[in-house]
Image (spheres, grey):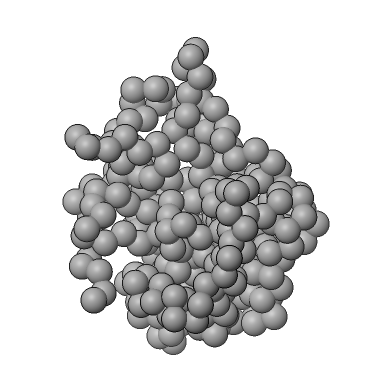
C-alpha cells in the first residue's frame, strides 16, 4: 500500500506546521527547534481539544531567540513521515545552527501496516539515520528522543513499558552516531509510576466520552514538555540561557487550539 501524490498533498494541507516563540523564525539572531514526530508531540486544533501534543507546550520553556516549528503529525512513523516527503519539507526549511528533535515509535510498532511498520534494530534505525544525516548535511544538530510512554499499569499498579525494543534501538543508534539522546521514554515511565494509576488520568485525554491512554491533555503535555526541556539542558543541547520556567507552574490556560486550516 502506498499514498498517491494527491493524498500526500491533502495531508500536508491538513497539517501545516505552526511556528511558535517570541522571535520570528528566520529572524537574524534566532534559532529554530524543529520537531519531527507523531501525534503525542503534534499541534492539535480546536476540533480535537482538549487533546494536546507536548510540542504545543515546549515554547513555554524556551527563551527569546529560540522558536519551535512543530512538524509532528498524527499517525506517522519514522518511515511514513519520510515517504510522504515531510522530512524533505523540514530539510528545505532548516538553517545552520537550528535543531531537529526526532521522536518516533508509536506507529513504527504497527506490524500489520506496511506503510508505517519498521523493525526496531534494522529499518527503524535506517530511517532514523536519514533524519540524522539530513540534519548534519545542513549544519543542523539532530537530537533523538525516545518515545513518550503510554498510560499502562499492571494489576499491582506498576507502570508498564509499551514500546518494546524501540527505545533500546534508539539508544543504540544515538551511541553509534554520537547523537544527543533525550530519554523521554524512561523519564515519562518514572513520572507515571510516581503519579500512580488514578492521578495519571489527569494527564491524559480522559473525558466524559473518551478514555485515551496515549494522548495528553494540557497538564500532560506541559509535564512532558518539561521533561524534554530538562533533557535538552542535561545533554547540553541547550544552555541555561536558552531555557526558562523549568521549575515553575505553567497555567493550563496558556494552551490554545487554533482552528484547522480549511
In the rendered image, which quarter contains the N terminus? bottom right
Residue 66 shows in this picture: no
Q: Which is nearer the eye, 101 or 52? A: 52
Depicted 94 relative to depicted 50: above or below? below
Horizontal side of 222 relative to 79 (left or right) equals left
Depicted 48 relative to depicted 261: above or below? above
Q: Residue furthest front?
A: 1
Q: Residue furthest right?
A: 176
The x and y percentages for residue 244 are 39, 56
Residue located 26% across and 54% down the image: 48
Residue located 35% across and 44% down the image: 216
Horizontal side of 155 relative to 205 (left or right) equals right
Horizontal side of 196 relative to 81 (left or right) equals left
The x and y percentages for residue 147 are 55, 47
Q: Quadrant location of residue 103?
A: bottom right
Residue 148 shows in this picture: yes
Residue located 47% across and 37% down the image: 150
How many numbered circles does the render carry? 0
Depicted 135 relative to depicted 173: above or below? below
Q: Quadrant location of residue 53?
A: bottom left
The x and y percentages for residue 177 are 77, 61
In the rendered image, which quarter contains the C terminus? bottom left
Horizontal side of 158 relative to 68 (left or right) equals right
Q: Residue furthest top?
A: 156
Residue located 27% across and 38% down the image: 210
Q: Which is nearer the eye, 206 or 220? A: 206
Amino acid at each position: 500500500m502506498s499514498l498517491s501524490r494527491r493524498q500526500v498533498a491533502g495531508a500536508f494541507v491538513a497539517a501545516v506546521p505552526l511556528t511558535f516563540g517570541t522571535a520570528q523564525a528566520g529572524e537574524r539572531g534566532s534559532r529554530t527547534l524543529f520537531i519531527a514526530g507523531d501525534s503525542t508531540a503534534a499541534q492539535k486544533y480546536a476540533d480535537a481539544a482538549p487533546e494536546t501534543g507536548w510540542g504545543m507546550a515546549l515554547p513555554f520553556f524556551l527563551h527569546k531567540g529560540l522558536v519551535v516549528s512543530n512538524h509532528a503529525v498524527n499517525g506517522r512513523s519514522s518511515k511514513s513521515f519520510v515517504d510522504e516527503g515531510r522530512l524533505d519539507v523540514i530539510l528545505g526549511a532548516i538553517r545552520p545552527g537550528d535543531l531537529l528533535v526526532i521522536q518516533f515509535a508509536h506507529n513504527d510498532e504497527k506490524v500489520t501496516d506496511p506503510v508505517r511498520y519498521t523493525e526496531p534494530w534494522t529499518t527503524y534505525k535506517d530511517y532514523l539515520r536519514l533524519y540524522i544525516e539530513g540534519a548534519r548535511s545542513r549544519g543542523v544538530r539532530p537530537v533523538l528522543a525516545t518515545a513518550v510512554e503510554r498510560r499502562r499499569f499492571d494489576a499491582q499498579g506498576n507502570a508498564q513499558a509499551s514500546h518494546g525494543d524501540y527505545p533500546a534501538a534508539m539508544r543504540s543508534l544515538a551511541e553509534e552516531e554520537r547523537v544527543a539522546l533525550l530519554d523521554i521514554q524512561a523519564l515519562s515511565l518514572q513520572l507515571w509510576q510516581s503519579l500512580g494509576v488514578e492521578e495519571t488520568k489527569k494527564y491524559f485525554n480522559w473525558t466524559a466520552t473518551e478514555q485515551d491512554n496515549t494522548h495528553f491533555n494540557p497538564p500532560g503535555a506541559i509535564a512532558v514538555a518539561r521533561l524534554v526541556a530538562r533533557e535538552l539542558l542535561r545533554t547540553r543541547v541547550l544552555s541555561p540561557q536558552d531555557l526558562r520556567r523549568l521549575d515553575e507552574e505553567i497555567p493550563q490556560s496558556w494552551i490554545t487550539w487554533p482552528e484547522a486550516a480549511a
